[in-house]
Image: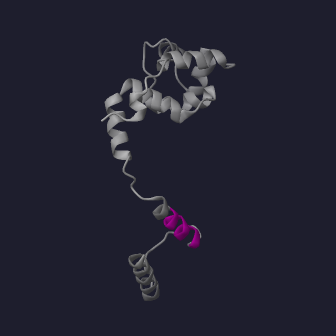
């Protein structure tokens, strides 16, 4: 199953996109390489499409060029590993937790003032939690 992201064909390759972004920036290849902590030749290979941008360097590249790291990462996955992206998207479609569950966890963390939360340090906490669960069943 192909998702919306993998069905959409981008007009520019990652290399073309990065070359355009580099040209639009105030940086040259040497400066970009220095900021990213890689060799200038590697930057040249990446922007000419002779080498792929390593995924672990996406954030550094995006930060240096002042572009969206998530978008660049998705572009890389779409071009370099489309089958992996399809699998990831298929798994991600099913949320691990709902927004309401996430909110409940957030509230527990806030109420616990950043300390490690240990469930049921005393019987009163267990009773209160059980009572809370009963209210959910009634809904």
Q: Name the residue located 52 percent from the left edge and 13 percent from the top edge.
A: 44
| Point 42% across, 16% down: residue | 51
Residue 103 position in % (x across, y down): 52, 63
Left or right of residue 97, residue 65 in this image: right
Looking at the image, which is closer to me, 120 or 4? 4
In the image, taking residue 2 as reference, residue 75 lies left or right, namely: right
Q: Is residue 127 above or below residue 101?
A: below
- Left or right relative to 77: residue 69: right
- Determine if the magenta segment contains residue 105: yes
Residue, far front: 139
Whether 71 is among the magenta residues is: no
Q: Residue furthest right?
A: 26
Where on the picture, by quarter, is residue 119? Answer: bottom left
Closest to the observer, 75 or 1: 1
Instruction: Give how far across and how far down residue 84 sits, in percent.
Output: 33, 34
The N terminus: image quadrant: top left
Residue under the image location 40 percent in, 24 percent down: 79
Front residue of 74 and 100: 100
Q: What segment is highlighted magenta in the picture?
A: 103-111
Front-most of residues 66 and 36:
66
Residue 108's spot in the image, x, y percent? 52, 70
Say if residue 81 shows up in the picture. yes
Q: Quarter of the image containing the C terminus?
A: bottom left
Q: Quadrant of residue 85?
A: top left
């Amino acid at each position: 199953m192909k998702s919306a992201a993998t069905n959409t064909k981008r007009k520019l390759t990652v290399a073309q996109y990065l070359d355009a972004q580099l040209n639009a920036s105030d940086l040259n290849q040497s400066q970009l390489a220095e900021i990213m902590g890689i060799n200038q030749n590697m930057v040249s290979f990446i922007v000419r499409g002779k080498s792929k941008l390593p995924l672990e360097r996406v954030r550094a590249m995006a930060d240096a060029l002042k572009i969206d790291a998530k978008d660049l990462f998705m572009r890389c996955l779409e071009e370099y590993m489309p089958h992996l992206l399809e699998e990831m998207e298929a798994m991600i479609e099913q949320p691990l937790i709902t927004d309401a569950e996430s909110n409940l966890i957030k509230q527990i963390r806030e109420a616990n003032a950043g300390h490690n939360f240990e469930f049921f340090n005393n019987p009163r906490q267990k009773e209160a939690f059980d009572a809370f669960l009963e209210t959910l069943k009634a809904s």
